[in-house]
Image (cartoon, helix red, strand yellow):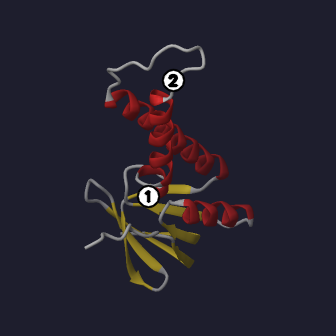
């Protein structure tokens, strides 16, 4: 297995990983951005801030009487709220993909595992593996919500 060389490898595509990748490219570095989830953006985009605020706004719109005095539809379906959520999250992820491509960031999907201080192996969904090396590896894997006991 040959090793692909980058100046910087960023593990995690949430807000911190995206910013690290873009700043590195703007500084003239070659960058690979690795993400294990199906789409770029991390928890912020797919399970956290953006989905919760989008659902809240959609629910408020659906339950606030219009200014024209008409009534709220009594049969509002949850599907109408979730379709708006899917649309907003999808548009945001697509925007971030375009931003990475436009800036020349190599976006790679799979699970990263360190094999040395300057090398990671990326395992793709199909089981294939590739080795990436870099002088600097940024770990931007984010956090998970704490589960109350």
Q: Quadrant of the N terminus?
A: bottom left
* Above or below for 29 versus 95: below
- Secondary structure at badge 2 equals loop
**Callout 1: few (<14), some (14-19), or many (20+) C-alpha neighbours within 10 Å?**
many
| Of 52 and 2, the residue lying toward us | 52
* Above or below for 49 versus 145: above
User: Farthest right residue?
Assistant: 27
User: Farthest front residue?
Assistant: 69
Asked whether residue 89 appears in the rendered view, the answer is no
Q: Residue at x 55, y 15 (%)?
A: 69
* Above or below for 91 versus 43: above
Q: Residue at x 53, y 76 (%)?
A: 137
Q: Residue at x 74, y 67 (%)?
A: 27
Hey, which quadrant is residue 146 in on the image? bottom left
- Secondary structure at badge 1 equals helix
| Of 33 and 116, the residue lying toward us | 33
x%, y% of residue 89?
47, 41
First in sequence: mark 2 vs mark 1: 1
Q: Is residue 67 left or right of residue 139?
A: right
x%, y% of residue 133?
49, 75
User: Farthest bottom residue?
Assistant: 117
Q: Residue at x 29, y 60 (%)?
A: 128
* Above or below for 126 versus 33: above
Q: Quadrant of the C terminus?
A: bottom left
Give the spatial CA distance, label 2 vs label 1.
33 Å
**Callout 2: few (<14), some (14-19), or many (20+) C-alpha neighbours within 10 Å?**
few
Which label belongs to residue 43? 1
Residue receiving disc 2: 65
């Amino acid at each position: 297995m040959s090793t692909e060389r980058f100046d910087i490898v960023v593990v995690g595509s949430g807000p911190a990983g995206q910013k690290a990748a873009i700043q590195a490219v703007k500084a003239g570095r070659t960058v690979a951005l690795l993400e294990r989830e199906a789409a770029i953006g991390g928890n912020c985009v797919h399970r956290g801030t953006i989905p919760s605020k989008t659902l809240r706004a959609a629910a408020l719109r659906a339950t606030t009487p219009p200014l024209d005095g008409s009534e709220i539809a009594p049969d509002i379906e949850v599907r109408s709220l979730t379709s708006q959520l899917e649309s907003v999250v999808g548009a945001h992820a697509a925007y971030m993909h375009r931003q990475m491509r436009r800036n020349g960031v190599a976006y790679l999907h799979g699970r990263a595992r360190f094999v040395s201080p300057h090398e990671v192996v990326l395992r793709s969904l199909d089981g294939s593996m590739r080795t990436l090396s870099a002088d600097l590896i940024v770990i931007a894997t984010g956090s998970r919500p704490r589960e109350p006991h």
